[in-house]
Amino acid sequence: MNAIHLSVIIVLFGYLSMELATANSLPTGFLWYNDKHGHEPNNSTSKLMSGLMIIESRN
C-alpha cells in the first residue's frame, strides 16, 4: 500500500466519521429510518423529537 492509498483511506474514514456524527443523528434521519422500516411516528415519537429539538436549541 503506497501513500496515495493510505491518504484516500484516511480521507474516506474522516468523511464517514463526520457523516455519522452529524447527518445520521438528525431527527430527519431518525424519522426516515422508521418510515423505511414500516413504523409510523406516534405521539411518543413526537414528544421525543420535540425534546431533542429543545436540547439542540440549548446547545
Image (cartoon, rainbow, N blue to C red):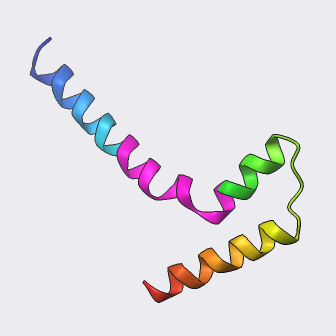
Residue drawn 72% across the image and 47% down it: 33
Depth check, front residue: 58 or 8: 58
Q: Position of residue 44 (x, y in %)?
A: 81, 69
Whether 27 is among the magenta residues is yes
Residue drawn 45% across the image and 48% down it: 20
Residue drawn 70% across the image and 72% down it: 49
Q: Is residue 2 above or below residue 21?
A: above
Q: Position of residue 28 (x, y in %)?
A: 68, 62
Residue drawn 87% across the image and 71% down it: 43
Q: Quadrant of the C terminus?
A: bottom left
Farthest-out residue, front: 44
Q: Position of residue 39 (x, y in %)?
A: 86, 49
- Which picture quadrant has residue 26? bottom right
In the image, the segment drawn in magenta is 16-29
Depth check, front residue: 7 or 14: 14
Q: Main secondary structure of the magenta part?
A: helix
Q: Relative to residue 35, is residue 29 drawn left or right?
A: left
Labels in figure, total: 0
Q: Relative to residue 34, is residue 57 drawn left or right?
A: left
Q: Is residue 54 above or below residue 44?
A: below
